[in-house]
Amino acid sequence: MLNMEQILIILSVKLNDHVLIQLGYDTGTAWYKTAGDTSINRELVESIKTAIKLGYYHLDGAEVYGPEAELGLFYQSGVEREENFLVKDAGKARSIVVSNFLQSHLDTVSKSARIPPSTNQIEYHPYLQHGNLVPFQKDKGIQTASYAPLTPATWRKYAVDEGEILLRWSLNRSIVTITTCSKESRLISYPRAPNFTLTPKEIDGISELG
């Protein structure tokens, strides 16, 4: 059984400007705030603290969802700020990340951007694989990140649940995977994915489900 330090090394991927941990915790869609809501969501704060304690050092949050105040309280987890991967620091973006871009959008950006995007976050799972988009991005040095990757598959062989199988499938395809799950049992199980591997036939079989 791998320890968390070994797991984080395995889950590290090199972007065009830095290294990113493949498994991240999302404070966005599932925790959406309405415009003007300045309250602190204590449930989200506790969920962030739990995720960090379990080794989720890649925290994802978009301004449109309003999680900044809750993310700012992550120090309550007891983990030093420097240990976390901060998508934005000192008000400046560390890296250019786009969301839901298709190949045509990326082509347009590449014609004018001085610094190309490092990552494109898309919905990605066996039922939505976007044709040639992922290999196109790989050729351009753009990392694919996914949300909603967890859909049912075969899991009994490895004594894990379907979520872990689909996470392993995503990792095998070098996809950075973001989860919004707040259940501690799930957050504990997902980092176990590097402890087993799917055969090429199993990977192809899951891919063909879509």
Image: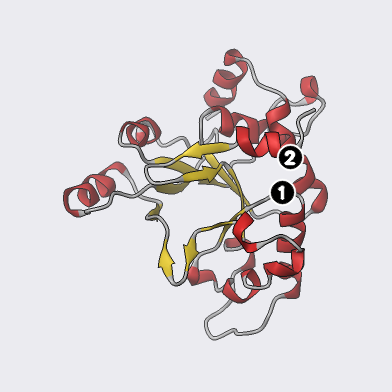
Query: Callout 2: helix, strand or loop?
Result: helix
CA–CA distance in space, label 2 to label 1: 7 Å
- Which residue is labeled 1 in the image? 55
Q: Does residue 163 appear in this view?
A: no
Whether residue 196 is situated above or below residue 115 in the rendered picture: above
Whether residue 64 is situated above or below residue 54 in the rendered picture: below
Three-letter amino acid code at the position of disc 2: Met
Of callouts 2 and 1, the N-terminal one: 2
Whether residue 143 is situated above or below residue 201 in the rendered picture: below
Q: Is the N terminus in the top left, top right, bottom left or bottom right quadrant? A: top right
Q: Does residue 153 appear in this view?
A: yes
- Which residue is found at the position 54% from the left and 70% from the top? 65
In this rendering, position of residue 184 left or right of residue 72: right
Three-letter amino acid code at the position of disc 1: Gly
Q: Position of residue 63 (x, y in %)?
A: 49, 70
- Which residue is labeled 2 in the image? 4
Disc 1 crowd rating (10 Å Cα; few below 14, some 14-19, many 20+) is some
Q: Quadrant of residue 26?
A: bottom right
The mark tally for this picture is 2
Q: Position of residue 49 (x, y in %)?
A: 74, 62
Disc 2 crowd rating (10 Å Cα; few below 14, some 14-19, many 20+) is some
Q: Position of residue 133 (x, y in %)?
A: 36, 36
- Which residue is found at the position 67% from the left and 50% from the top? 56
Q: Position of residue 118 (x, y in %)?
A: 38, 47
Q: Nearer the viewer, residue 73 or 169?
A: 73
Q: Quadrant of residue 53?
A: bottom right
- Which residue is found at the position 58% from the left and 21% from the top? 203
Marker disc for residue 119 = none
Q: Are marks 2 and 1 in contact (CB under 8 Å)?
A: yes
Q: Quadrant of residue 132?
A: top left
- Which residue is found at the position 66% from the left and 84% from the top? 39
